[in-house]
Amino acid sequence: MCCFTRNVESVTDTRIFARDSRAMMQFLVYEMKFSANEDLAMILPLPVPKRTAEKAVRFINLDKYPNFFSQMESGFAPDRGGAAGGFGGGAMGGSPLKVVDVGSFEASFVPAINDFSRLDERFRLSPGAWEQLPQYKNFGFAVFKLKKGQIKIHPMAFEFPRVDRTQLFFPTVHIHDGKVHSEAEFDHTLYAQFRIEHQISMLDWTESRQPAGMFMSIKMCEGLVSKLNHVYKHVIKGKHKNEDVVA
């Protein structure tokens, strides 16, 4: 879910990478270009187990690897595309949530919808928005504080616990104007490294020419990318049903 707590003028070139981590954990890396007239927050839903602890999500700093995704893209032939296809202060309902400095932005993990009251009001969605998103009633949320302007920030990365180890989750639901629309305009490139049990999903994705270690700076990836495995790519552009992607 590319969900913003204030109106944004534009959001383009969204790129997301997902990979299995430890047994019940997943890595996620997220990057986009956006333009906004005021400070705001971006919220990404996470299918975490119930009663997940506030410290369960580990944020990973990639400020020294801003070209993470451009190097990942270099692993694909030019003619082969994917399938078309501070937060605290004044909070109520508990102590302010922990804020983590992650390179050029701040991040927090919100364990449940009710915990948004522990963030500054600018960085929450309206209660009415959550009523339109019942699929997230048991989710947790990664929240990133962003500055106004026309910005491309370094990739946002983290590791989170998940309910289903057989699936990779890509947050792609859009909320850019405070409203939930049934369809949305997509400009997304998804990347993944799959486990053997994901072979059915792999059929819809384009495979890199070589293992990731041949075209990425693995030492700078902070453990996010497996050097021995190939990367798979799936492109989603144009108007599509406004929903997350699970592979």
Image (cartoon, grey):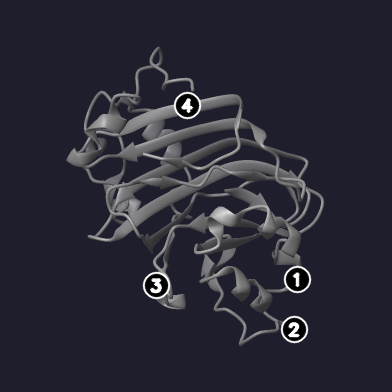
Which amino acid, by three-letter code, is at mark 4? Answer: Val
Rendered image: mark on residue 52: none
- Residue 240 vertical position relative to residue 146 in the rendered view, above or below: above
Q: Residue furthest bottom?
A: 95
The residues bearing labels 4 and 2 have C-alpha atoms spaced at a distance of: 41 Å
Rendered image: mark on residue 90: 2
Residue 162 visible here: yes
Left or right of 31 on screen, residue 48: left
The residues bearing labels 1 and 2 have C-alpha atoms spaced at a distance of: 9 Å
Dot 1 lies on which element? Answer: helix
Which amino acid, by three-letter code, is at mark 2? Answer: Gly
Q: Position of residue 116 (x, y in %)?
A: 64, 71
The residues bearing labels 4 and 1 have C-alpha atoms spaced at a distance of: 34 Å
Left or right of 199 on screen, residue 33: right
Q: Which residue is mark 3?
A: 56
Residue drawn 70% across the image and 65% down it: 124
Is mark 1 in CB contact (under 8 Å) with mark 2? yes
Left or right of 177 on screen, residue 201: left
Residue drawn 42% across the image and 73% down it: 52
Which amino acid, by three-letter code, is at mark 3? Answer: Ala
For the residue carrying disc 2, how many other residues have a C-alpha within 10 Å: few (<14), some (14-19), or many (20+)? Answer: few
Q: Which residue is mark 4?
A: 235
In this view, the residue in front, 32 or 171, is 171
Q: Which residue is mark 1?
A: 121
Residue drawn 48% across the image and 55% down it: 63
In this view, the residue in front, 111 or 181, is 181
Q: Position of residue 149 (x, y in %)?
A: 76, 49
* Mark nearer the N terminus (1 vs 2): 2
* Mark nearer the N terminus (4 vs 3): 3
* Mark nearer the N terminus (4 vs 1): 1
Which amino acid, by three-letter code, is at mark 1? Answer: Glu
In this view, the residue in front, 11 or 181, is 181
